[in-house]
Amino acid sequence: MRIALGLALCLFAIIAVLSFMQALQRNQFEDIRTFESFDLQIDLQSNDYSAAKEAANQIEELDSVQHAFVYADIPVIAQGTNGSTVAGRLRGIEGEGRFLSNLNSYRGFLFQDGQVASSYSNTHSIDMGESLTLTFLKKGRQATVVPSRRELEVGAIFYTSSYDFDISTFLCNVDTLLAMQADAPLKIGVFTLEDVKDVKGELVQLGYERTSTWMEINASLYSAMELEQKMMALMLFLMVLVILVHIRNSARRLLLAKQTEIAMLRTIGLTKAKVQTIFVLQAAVVAIIGSLVGIFLSYGALAIYPTLSAYVYRSMGVHLEPAIRSGELLVLCIVIVVFSLLASYQGTHRILKADIMEMFTHDEIN
Amino acid sequence: MMKSTEVLTLEAVSKSFPATLRGGEPIQILEGVSLSLNRSTSIAITGRSGSGKSTLLQISAGLLSADSGSIRFEGKEITKLDDEHLSRLRSRSMGFIFQSSLLLDDFTALENVQISAMIAGSSEKEASRKSLAMLELVGMQDRLGHTSDQLSGGERQRVAIARALVNEPSLIFADEPTGSLDERNAALVEDLLFSLVAEREVALMLITHNLAFASRCNTVYQLHNRNVEVRS
């Protein structure tokens, strides 16, 4: 029973790490794709707003495209009335689709002409109704020779699931942004449910050659996350290895503890094949019970997770939605059961190679 | 043709063990031992400690392999039998009583006897019936549900005797069956063993230090200089 419980806890630990890491990565990828850089973005190299809107409409007609909308980013330093500053960006955007649906209005109304929206994360320094002084920077966040400044009222407070986005971004509509900096280069953000590489191909064919996928835009971050994924796989592999060693050692300990009994049963006529069958079946039962308890613990923890999510958010700053992939779980359970059978088979095979009296007298058959 | 009365025949049996677990010059324990045992007769093997008495019993029962020689049990050469056949022979035709009774700890007295009958091929019901009768015969009818650790040394040996006899074997191998008992319990077990062996016409191979106990057998062998010689 203790062996089965040990197996169950190991399985539970693996499932917990796996589902949390996957949820964390999903969360990070979703934030990048939704708020930071969209699924694809097209650099128009123009500030003709009406032409940009026409292009967005044309792109949105593609079957593979969910939403396409015009936006522009300007690097800024924002200064509140109390003198505190935030280095970030002002994003002018036609809030639509996934972007808008993931943008939560905390107070006020978003995208009011001539007003800017700040995030809830910045309310300690820049609150609603206050006047915000924006100093426009060049690309790369360098100050211009002659500083260009504008003042805007904070008309709304928003929040998203991305803390990084929230602390560095001020939002307004495109008209408001162009009114402050008419030569701001416009871009088109695209959301799609299809493969981004395929959609990029379609857009390039339409003549939008300066199209980039979210993976290309965030190449360094994406590769870092890929590395994280590989490390996670390695860690999980090591955890599985620990389970397998635990199974092997448990099978060995069990057989050593039962060695005298095996010898006794052999003395009164039990065949080697029957001894082996008994122990292999016993290992199968232990592995199956351990796996079932592990699965029960995992799904149980998943069911009560919503009550713990607030604590996770406070400690990690992210809302995670862990999920269990039944395919991975099944493979893991099959590996555990099969290895248990093999470990037990190999262990009994080794013990049974000895003469019966050697089993009685030896502490361990090597 | 008349059926042979020989149950066990050993011819030129030799056995050596490595000096250490890592090998080394082997120590010769038995060398060219020959003896035979007929139905309804008993032999005792005596000798000093470490002379190879238990080894001889274990080899005779196929519990330990011999280096050379022939061991025939009921006319079958057991050194040539596969595991399936040797196991069947042990379960149906041999009974074992060791110094420490070697009962299965988690099993009750009844179950310890019952499992032996079931391994020999009896159904659960039949095994239960035979085991109850045998435990009654050894005076353990009131201790059927007790596990090994709830029984005294003498009681455990009586259960072991019941287990050895439940399948009506043709030969009982008894290795110091009273070695760990006090005088009174030893005498009880001795009497019980000899009365049942005589009553059921079973052959007995007894290993003991106790010459008085040994003298109750038809033949007493002394194991000396790696071989046996008749003592009386």
Image (tube, helix red, strand yellow):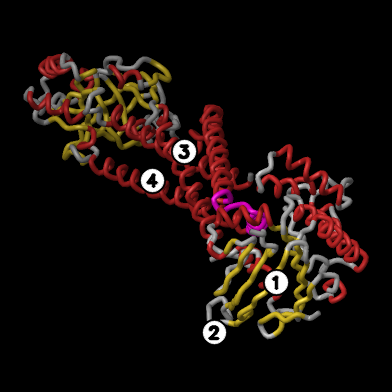
Q: Chain of mark 1?
A: B
Q: Position of residue B195 (x, y in %)?
A: 86, 59
Q: Chain of mark 4?
A: A
Task: Say which mark, if any, is on residue B54.
Answer: 1
Q: Which amino acid is tagged 1?
A: Ser
**Is circle 2 on the same chain as circle 4?**
no
Q: Nearer the viewer, mark 3 or mark 1?
A: 1
Residues at circles 2 and 4 in contact by the CB criterion of under 8 Å:
no
Mark before the other along the chain sequence, 1 or 2: 2
Q: Could you tell me which residue is drawn at 68 percent across and 74 percent down? A: B35
Task: Say which mark, if any, is on residue A232.
Answer: 4
Q: Chain of mark 2?
A: B
Q: Secondary structure at mark 4?
A: helix
**Residue A292 or residue A323, whichever sits in front:** A292
Q: Nearer the viewer, mark 3 or mark 4?
A: 4
Residue holding disc 2: B25
Q: Could you tell me which residue is drawn at 59 percent across and 55 percent down? A: A255
Q: Residue furthest front?
A: B1
Whole-number angstrom distance, CA of label 2 to CA of label 4: 55 Å
Whole-number angstrom distance, CA of label 3 to CA of label 1: 69 Å
Mark before the other along the chain sequence, 3 or 4: 4
Q: Secondary structure at mark 3?
A: helix
**Residue A277 or residue B97, whichever sits in front:** B97
Residue holding disc 3: A316
Residue A184 visible? The answer is no
Q: Nearer the viewer, mark 1 or mark 2?
A: 1
Whole-number angstrom distance, CA of label 1 to CA of label 2: 22 Å
Q: Which amino acid is tagged 4?
A: Met
Q: Residue furthest right?
A: B184
Q: Which amino acid is tagged 3?
A: Met
